[in-house]
Image (cartoon, grey):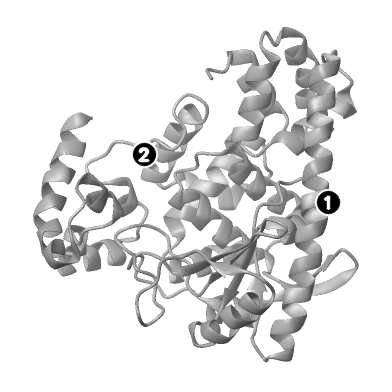
Amino acid sequence: MAADRESCELLRATVRRTPAAADQIGRLAEKVRNWDSLVFLAEEHGMSPMLYLRLAEMCPPVPLAVHERLRADYERNAFHGLANAAELIDLLKEFDREAIPAMPFKGVVLGASAYGDLATRPAGDVDLLIDRRHLARAAALLVDRGYELKTPVDADGIPDSAESFEYHFERHSDGMVVELRWRLDLSQPRFRRKLGIEWVWPRRCTAMLAGAEIPNLDPVSTLLVLCMHGSKHAWSRLIWINDIAQVLNSFPGIDWKEVIREAKRSGLWRSLALGILLAHRVADAAVPEPALRRFESDAAACSMAQHFEEALFDAPGSPPIGRQPYNIQLLDFHDRLRVFLSLDFLRPNARDRAVVRLPKSLHALYYLVRPIRLLWDRSAR
């Protein structure tokens, strides 16, 4: 469903927390021609709860049916968030009894810590980062709680896809979804940094969730993880940009020297620059001038940020065109060099396997499929 320009601008205005943006919400609401289009757009970008709250604050003229639909979606998300919070708290207690360190991220813990209200952000799934060594025990605990593993695995219990570092569990009785991750990856070819729980656990802090104190990423790790996630998915949803803005607004005293130092150490400088530039440009997030100048000095990051800002509603998820593929542009110089020297960019991935289905005995032929597919993709631009 194509969204009209007023709907796009209204949705963008909901993430800005300035007096001018508040006035703009009222003016734009009066110009919306297709409310169904706006609601659909908000759902696609994970912005329904915030759209409902901002419209309720500003009291612009909204059709009653639209107001009731947004309110129902908000209440449904609030219920979902409370259910996720209760399940997360119970899971963390069980993992703790089994001496399994687990770090929740995104979802309701981000809603509680950065948004100040877990109902304001879509609840999503329950995401937990654990050590690979504890995966079997953690999976067994989830099965005991009624979950079913949905990730295809081989005989050794390893995901069939070499690009996957997560187990996806679903519980049919209530629709609860839990994802166990043992590594955070940036892009394909596979990110060469082993960023797992050992990366974030030493700097962990705590958050209050539904009256319980739980482990949480510190603000530095939160920013880097969110920028990594948004960059990996080509910043195709407004909620991911708003997440960055909410963190910056909630933690104004963040140590920018440490953020930049850790981003460079972990190979996430370009992802960090992209996320901060988008949060500043799209959501008016406050960034100290010295730090902003550092990010704006990266010409490639500025160019990509402009592309994602312009494509946000018209072509979400479309990668920027450049001499190098987008996933390579995200990497720092040393990681790019490592990829090219190892010829890892020729390693077949899921997109290559989707071109043609081959039996396992012929999987070596995907090394011939990949260069053809890459040339086809480039020529199609």
Amino acid type, label 2: Pro
Q: Residue at x 67, y 71 (%)?
A: 146
Q: Nearer the viewer, residue 285 or 28?
A: 28
> Is residue 247 placed above or below 144 in the rendered structure?
above
Expressed as whole percent of the image width and height from the top left, the position of residue 142 reads 64, 75
Expressed as whole percent of the image width and height from the top left, the position of residue 74 reads 80, 38
- Quick one: quadrant of the C terminus? top left
Q: Helix, strand or loop at disc 1?
A: loop
Q: Residue at x 17, y 56 (%)?
A: 358
Expressed as whole percent of the image width and height from the top left, the position of residue 56 reads 88, 27
> Is residue 186 placed above or below 287 in the rendered structure?
below
- Quick one: quadrant of the N terminus? top right
The disc at residue 324 is none
Q: Nearer the viewer, residue 285 or 355?
A: 355
Q: Quadrant of residue 18?
A: top right
Q: Residue at x 66, y 30 (%)?
A: 42
Q: Is residue 287 visible?
A: no
Q: Is residue 165 left or right of residue 360?
A: right
The disc at residue 117 is 1
Q: Quadrant of residue 179?
A: bottom right
> Is residue 114 placed above or below 321 in the rendered structure?
below
Q: Nearer the viewer, residue 370 or 257?
A: 370
**Residue identified by numbered label 2:** 319
CA neighbours of label 1 inside 10 A, class few (<14), some (14 to 19), many (20+): some
Q: Nearer the viewer, residue 279 or 290?
A: 279
Amino acid type, label 1: Asp
Expressed as whole percent of the image width and height from the top left, the position of residue 94 reads 73, 83
The residues tagged by marks 1 and 2 sit, at their Cα atoms, a distance apart of 32 Å
